[in-house]
Amino acid sequence: MTPHDDDDPTPPRVGALRARRARIDAEIAAEVRRPAPDALRLQELKRRRLKAKDEMAGVFRTLSRPDQLPAA
């Protein structure tokens, strides 16, 4: 079985972005649990998480508009 089977409508790029967001979420959780969380690090992590979310939205937007798909 491959990571992207025909019956799986999720593109591999979305899976990679979801995994990235999960790793960032774990880093955020770890930072928050520290005795003195670093506010600048939290801000940067949240910015990275938002960027991944925006990239995912872009992928879905492209998928919903077949005329925007890259030529094969």
Image (tube, rainbow, N blue to C red):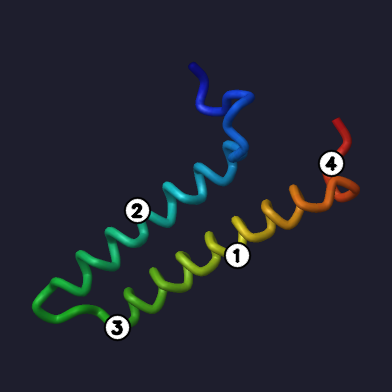
Confirm or deny contact between disc 2 and disc 1 (CB under 8 A): no
- The percent coordinates of residue 70 (x first, y second) are 84, 41
Is the residue marked by circle 3 packed among few (<14), some (14-19), or many (20+) residues within 10 Å?
Answer: few
- Element at badge 3? helix
Q: Which residue is painted at 57% across and 28% down in the image? A: 4
Amino acid of disc 4: Pro
Rendered view: 23 above or below 51: above
Q: Which residue type carries mark 1?
A: Asp
For disc 2, the marked residue is 23
Which residue is depicted at the point 54% across and 62% down? 53
Q: Please give the residue where the numbered disc 4 appears in the rendered image.
A: 70
First reached walking from the N terminus: tag 1 or tag 3: 3
| Residue drawn at (85%, 46%) of the image | 66
Residue sitting at the far front: 7
Q: Nearer the viewer, mark 3 or mark 4?
A: 4
Q: Residue 39, which numbered label? A: 3
The percent coordinates of residue 60 (x first, y second) are 68, 53
Element class at badge 2: helix
Spatial separation of the CA atoms under disc 2 and disc 1: 16 Å
Discs 3/2, front: 2
Dot 2 or dot 1, earlier in sequence: 2
Contact flag, marks 1 and 4 (Cβ < 8 Å)? no
First reached walking from the N terminus: tag 2 or tag 4: 2
